[in-house]
């Protein structure tokens, strides 16, 4: 297992290096600059600003200096927020995005697992058709459509929630439903398929023949193997939930890192864009590694391979 983890970590290094390189040069080749949206400044002031942030140097020198600072954990200063570093901005905004992701994942697992298990127990009945149909609708609805629909229904129509903001516990519900609803649909379908396959195995029939209760058969014998496809899906799902928060935070005006990333892209805040991309890449790689370890733990045959 340790060799497997070490191999995956070594594989992540070139991936991150390529990502950093592409992002670094891509944001600098975009038309405009971090100071182009400011009030008209004299050429002398602009030169002083560029010299202060090192933008007057060649791209190669800027890139090498950025890598050197990155090795020390320094993501550089923000070009749009005077006297603030990218590290400080991420430390302020990231907890909000992680909380949103945790709420969304909870919604996805709760709804998806419940619907999938229920549908697998009574195939080709109403208990199967209803959740399966809802799952198909959830897969077809993108978050930028589902979010405004939920706002129209539950915030503007019924007045149960605020249309935007991030203050009380009630402000977490609509964003979490929007972000987690889509993944709940996928998890429901995967759970149904996995459980149907396991429930048809001989050892399940043996357990029932020995007089085990249906609850024991499900919880003790079927659930572990039936959820294996769901565990494998959690890595891409977490990556999607993290990247999907960009849209959700913009729709619901949530002060998280995703919304800050969108603003930094419009502001040409080079260091904040690059720092955010690096952070999300590290999180996605870490989440996928944890999921892979969980899959190996659930399926002992993979340890031998």
Image (spheres, grey):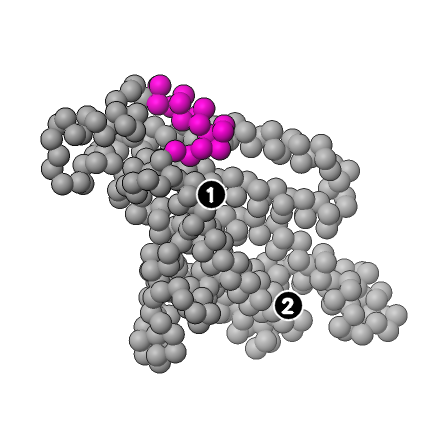
Q: Classify mark 1: residues with Cα within 10 Å, few (<14), some (14-19) or many (20+).
A: some
Viewer-closest of 276 and 238: 276
**Position of residue 95 measured from the top left corner of the image (x, y, whole percent):** 48, 53
Q: Which mark is residue 58?
A: none
User: Height in image: 128 above or below 195?
Assistant: below
Q: Which mark is residue 280?
A: 1
Q: Quick check: 151 left or right of 231?
A: left
Badge nearest the viewer, 2 or 1: 1
Q: Quick check: 93 left or right of 13?
A: left
Q: Quadrant of residue 7?
A: top right
Q: Classify mark 2: residues with Cα within 10 Å, few (<14), some (14-19) or many (20+).
A: many
Please tell me which residue is depicted at 18% across the width and 29% down the height of the picture. Answer: 46
Q: Quadrant of residue 69?
A: top left
Q: Quadrant of the C terminus?
A: top right
Q: Which residue is mark 2?
A: 117
Q: Is residue 20 magenta?
A: no
Viewer-closest of 128 and 86: 86
* Circle 2/circle 1 CB separation < 8 Å: no
Q: Residue furthest bottom?
A: 158
Residues shaded magenta: 60-76
Please tell me which residue is depicted at 76% across the width and 43% down the height of the picture. Answer: 301
Q: Residue furthest front?
A: 83
Viewer-closest of 49 and 97: 49
**Position of residue 302 measured from the top left corner of the image (x, y, whole percent):** 73, 42
Q: Quadrant of residue 18?
A: top left
């Amino acid at each position: 297992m340790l060799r497997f983890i070490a191999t995956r970590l070594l594989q992540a290094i070139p991936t991150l290096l390529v990502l950093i390189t592409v992002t670094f040069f891509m944001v600098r080749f975009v038309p405009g600059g971090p100071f182009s949206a400011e009030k008209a400044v004299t050429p002398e002031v602009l030169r002083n600003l560029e010299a202060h942030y090192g933008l007057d140097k060649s791209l190669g020198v800027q890139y090498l200096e950025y890598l050197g600072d990155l090795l020390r954990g320094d993501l550089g200063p923000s070009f749009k927020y005077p006297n603030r570093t990218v590290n400080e901005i991420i430390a302020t905004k990231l907890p909000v995005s992680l909380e949103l992701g945790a709420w969304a994942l909870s919604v996805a697992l709760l709804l998806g697992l419940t619907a999938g298990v229920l549908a697998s127990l009574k195939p080709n009945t109403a208990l199967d058709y209803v959740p399966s149909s809802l799952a198909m609708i959830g897969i077809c609805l993108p978050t930028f459509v589902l979010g405004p629909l939920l706002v129209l229904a539950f915030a503007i129509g019924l007045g149960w929630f605020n249309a935007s903001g991030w203050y009380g516990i009630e402000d977490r519900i609509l964003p979490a439903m929007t972000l987690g609803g889509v993944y709940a649909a996928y998890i429901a379908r995967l759970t149904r398929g996995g459980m149907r396959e396991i429930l048809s195995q001989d050892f399940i029939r043996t357990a029932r023949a020995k007089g085990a209760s249906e609850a024991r058969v499900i919880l003790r014998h079927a659930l572990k193997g039936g959820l294996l496809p769901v565990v494998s899906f959690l890595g891409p799902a977490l990556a999607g939930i993290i990247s999907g928060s960009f849209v959700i935070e913009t729709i619901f005006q949530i002060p998280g890192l995703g919304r800050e990333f969108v603003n930094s892209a419009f502001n040409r805040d080079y260091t904040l864009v690059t720092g955010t991309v690096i952070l999300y890449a590290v999180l996605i790689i870490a989440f996928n590694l944890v999921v892979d370890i969980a899959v190996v733990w659930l399926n002992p045959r993979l340890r031998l391979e």
